[in-house]
Each structure stands twice: as structure tokens, then as C-alpha cells.
Image (cartoon, helix red, strand yellow):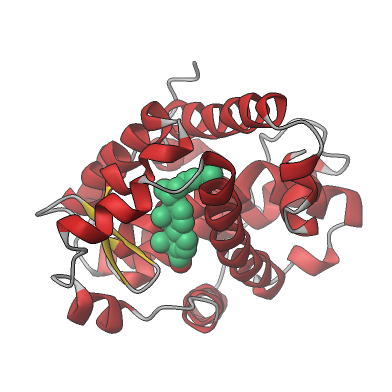
């Protein structure tokens, strides 16, 4: 496990003197990241808030639990893929991303998309009753029982709890997402330096944003990289178990984007 947190943002050394960013550039960067997030969200925060207490009844929960494993997987994978499409669109709107070479774009997306999904999931999570927005209502974790991966689901819900406790604003969520995607530490990058420059600018803008809102304290409380990685590994592992249980059939019906990223 890598004990680093995204808070190693605050290693002052990472901002080199030759990289002085003007305040105009900072504001443009903030605008870019925040707009990219807003425009690719699918569910707006206020809509999710309104629905927060619309939860599934016991009977509805049971009817989900009675679905077959492959049926439930197909359904969830479909929703996850849709959410990922929005995240890919978010990445494409981040300034500099489309100028990276196509190989590195894929490397960053493959490594980062699931982590961003987790961050975004916390927006759709009600920490007071531990439910997540799923197919129009808020669902407790038991709804996902027939998937056969309760440890994965429990870890996802746990992470959302920690994130909810931070009361992240939409601006903060936007930056946390963009910094996850533009992570120069991802293996297999061809032009690591180019990503490093983008990352440093983002980091600078994020810290500026936090300073102006007196929210620097969240930096040390953000989830550790290892925790997100662990959940991503679990997802891959569960996917493999599922593929072994249903060789051929089930996975072929998964959307191409999901297969491209995870299989
Ligand atoms: C997004 C909207 C969104 C859409 C789908 C991986 C697997 C086989 C099972 C939501 C995980 C089951 C997902 C559908 C379950 C935990 C998945 C299934 C934010 C994220 C969110 C709410 C996803 C959250 C995770 C869900 C519920 O903008």
C-alpha cells in the first residue's frame, strides 16, 4: 500500500520557481475544472438533495435481492458505464488533457475513472441512513446482495461515509476528481512530464481555492490513495470471479466501454 494521500499536495517543493502561475491563469483554471464538472455531472447536487429521503421500501429491496446474479451484474455494469461516460467527458474538458498523446489519455482514464466514480458516488450518498442513489431512489447496501460482492460494496459505502463527513463542495469535488485523473504517478505513462506540469497547475489552483475558502484543513483528511486503489482492485477481482462463474455469456453483454476499461 502506498500511504501517500492526495494531501501530499502540500509539499511546498512541488511548485518550482519557474512555474509561477498568474492569478488570471489560476482563475481560468478554476473556471475550467468547475465548469467541466458541472457540465458532466448527470445529476445535479440540488436534485440529489431533494431526493435524499426517497428510499426503497422493504418489499422493493427484497425484489432486487431476488434477481439473479448475472441479471444484477448486467444492470449495475450498465449504470456504472453510463457514469463512466460522463467522467470520460469530464476528462476531455480538462484543459491540456486532449493535448496529451492518445496512449497517455487511455492510461490516465483506465487508472483514474473508477476512483473518480467513487468520489462522485459520495455526492449521491446519504450518510445519515447509508443509502446511495440507484435507479431513481436511495438504496441501502442490501439491495446489491445478489451481486455476490458485499465486501466491495461495504468498502464503497465506507469510503462514501468518510467523504460525506468532509462536506465537500462541488468545487472541491471537481478538483479532487481532476487531480485524480491527471496523476503523473500512473504506471505506463509515456510522457510523464507533460502530465506533471498539468498536475502541478491544478494543485496550485486547488490550494488557492482552499486558501480563499479557509478549507485547507480538508487536505489531510482526504482518503489515502491506497484506499481508493484497494477498492479499484476489489472491483477488478470481483469482475474476474463473475467472469469465471459465467464464462462467455454474461460479459459479452457488457457495454464496450466497460470492457475496454476493465477487461
Ligand atoms: C454517478 C452516478 C452513479 C451511477 C451508478 C461495479 C458493480 C458491478 C457494482 C451508480 C457496484 C454496485 C452505481 C450503480 C453499486 C455500488 C453501483 C451500481 C455517481 C455514482 C453513481 C451513483 C454510481 C454509484 C455506485 C453504484 C450504485 O454520477
Q: Position of residue 229 (x, y in %)?
A: 52, 30
Q: Is residue 18 shown above or below 149?
A: below
Tell me: 238 left or right of 91. Answer: left
User: Could you tell me which residue is drawn at 88 percent across and 40 percent down?
Assistant: 190
Q: Position of residue 75 (x, y in %)?
A: 55, 57
The C terminus - image quarter: top right
Q: Quadrant of ligand 1?
A: bottom left
Towards the viewer: 76 or 39: 76
User: Could you tell me which residue is drawn at 47 percent across and 81 percent down?
Assistant: 38
User: Could you tell me which residue is drawn at 44 percent across and 31 percent down?
Assistant: 149
Q: Position of residue 33 (x, y in %)?
A: 53, 73
Q: How many marks?
A: 0
Q: Is residue 117 shown above or below 38?
A: above
Towards the viewer: 90 or 232: 232
User: Could you tell me which residue is drawn at 55 percent across and 34 percent down?
Assistant: 235
Towards the viewer: 47 or 249: 249
Towards the viewer: 115 or 23: 115
Q: Position of residue 197 (x, y in %)?
A: 69, 52
Q: Is residue 6 among what the camera can see?
A: no
Q: Dividing the picture into quarters, in which one does residue 262 lie? A: top right
In this view, the residue farthest toward the left is: 128
Amino acid at each position: 500500500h502506498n500511504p501517500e494521500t492526495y494531501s501530499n499536495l502540500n509539499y511546498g517543493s512541488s511548485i518550482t520557481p519557474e512555474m509561477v502561475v498568474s492569478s488570471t491563469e489560476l482563475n481560468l483554471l478554476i473556471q475550467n475544472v468547475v465548469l467541466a464538472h458541472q457540465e458532466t455531472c448527470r445529476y445535479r447536487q440540488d436534485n440529489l438533495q431533494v431526493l435524499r429521503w426517497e428510499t426503497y421500501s422493504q418489499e422493493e429491496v427484497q425484489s432486487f435481492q431476488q434477481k439473479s446474479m448475472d441479471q444484477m451484474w448486467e444492470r449495475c455494469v450498465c449504470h456504472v458505464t453510463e457514469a463512466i461516460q460522463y467522467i470520460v467527458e469530464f476528462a476531455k474538458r480538462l484543459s491540456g488533457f486532449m493535448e496529451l498523446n492518445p496512449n497517455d489519455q487511455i492510461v490516465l482514464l483506465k487508472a483514474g475513472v473508477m476512483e473518480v466514480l467513487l468520489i462522485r458516488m459520495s455526492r449521491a450518498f446519504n450518510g445519515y441512513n447509508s443509502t446511495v442513489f440507484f435507479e431513481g431512489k436511495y438504496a441501502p447496501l442490501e439491495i446489491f446482495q445478489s451481486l455476490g460482492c458485499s465486501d466491495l460494496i461495504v468498502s464503497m459505502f465506507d469510503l462514501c461515509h468518510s467523504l460525506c463527513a468532509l462536506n465537500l463542495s462541488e468545487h472541491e469535488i471537481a478538483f479532487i476528481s481532476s487531480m485524480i485523473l491527471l496523476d503523473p504517478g500512473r504506471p505506463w505513462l509515456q510522457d510523464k512530464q507533460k502530465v506533471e506540469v498539468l498536475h502541478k497547475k491544478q494543485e496550485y489552483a486547488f490550494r488557492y481555492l482552499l486558501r480563499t475558502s479557509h478549507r485547507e484543513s480538508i487536505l489531510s483528511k482526504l482518503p489515502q490513495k491506497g484506499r481508493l486503489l484497494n477498492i479499484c482492485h476489489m472491483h477488478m477481482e470481483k469482475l474476474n470471479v463473475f467472469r469465471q462463474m459465467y464464462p462467455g455469456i454474461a460479459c459479452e453483454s457488457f457495454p464496450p466501454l466497460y470492457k475496454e476499461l476493465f477487461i
